[in-house]
Image (cartoon, rainbow, N blue to C red):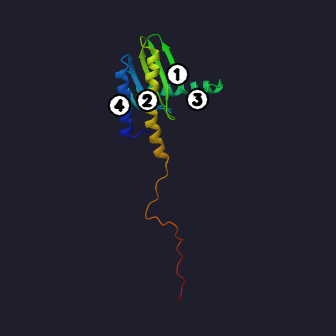
Amino acid sequence: MVPEAEAQDVLDELRRLRARVPLLTGALAAGTDGLVVAQDTPGIEAEGVAALTAAALGVAVRMTDATGRGGFRELLVRGGSGYIATYAAGSSAVLTLLAEDRINVGRLHLEGRRSGSRIGAVVDAVLERAERPAPPQGPARTGALPRRPAPDTR
């Protein structure tokens, strides 16, 4: 989905985010299809979390549609020992953060939204480049009429 150079940019953003918010225990960027773009999730199976994120995203999108709340922005789940927060990251990716129970949820949202926006810009730019038509090959002949075969003069 994302070339290696851009995946490295996303991974760098995840690492900077974890450095800014010490109570984050993991960060994962994935496509809305559930495929991992980049991850910094020590001790967690990133592929499984990405797949579960895609499933939760599907439900969250349907909920926002059904209740007239607009497009999906974020989802917060609180467990007995921490949080899982998922943020929209452009049109085709999501950012999922794992955090300790002691985290300041306001700061989690602030930093998660910022990083989601940055990651979304990277992923959307890749997809935009992939959707552009390929330039024509060979010499261009603009304004020229098609060549007709010369008449047979035998």
Q: Give the Cα distance between marks 2 and 3.
A: 19 Å
Q: Earlier in the sequence, mark 2 or mark 3?
A: 2
Point 43% across, 23% down: residue: 111
Q: What residue type is labelled 1?
A: Leu
Point 46% across, 45% down: residue: 129
For label 4, the residue is 12
Residue 29 disc label: 2
Q: Which amino acid does label 2 sit on?
A: Ala
Q: Give the Cα distance between marks 1 and 3.
A: 12 Å
Quadrant location, the N terminus: top left
Residue 24 disc label: none
- Secondary structure, mark 4, is helix
In depth, the one of 16 and 78 nearer the eye is 16
Q: Earlier in the sequence, mark 4 or mark 1?
A: 4
Q: Give the Cα distance between marks 4 and 3.
A: 27 Å
The answer to whether one can see residue 41 in this image is no
Is the residue 147 above or below the residue 8 in the image?
below
Within-10-Å neighbours for mark 4: few <14, some 14–19, many 20+: some
Residue 71 disc label: 3
Q: Give the Cα distance between marks 4 and 1.
A: 23 Å
Q: What residue type is labelled 3?
A: Gly
Q: What residue type is labelled 4?
A: Asp
For label 1, the residue is 75
Q: Give the Cα distance between marks 1 and 2.
A: 14 Å
Mark 1 against mark 3, which lies toward the viewer? 3
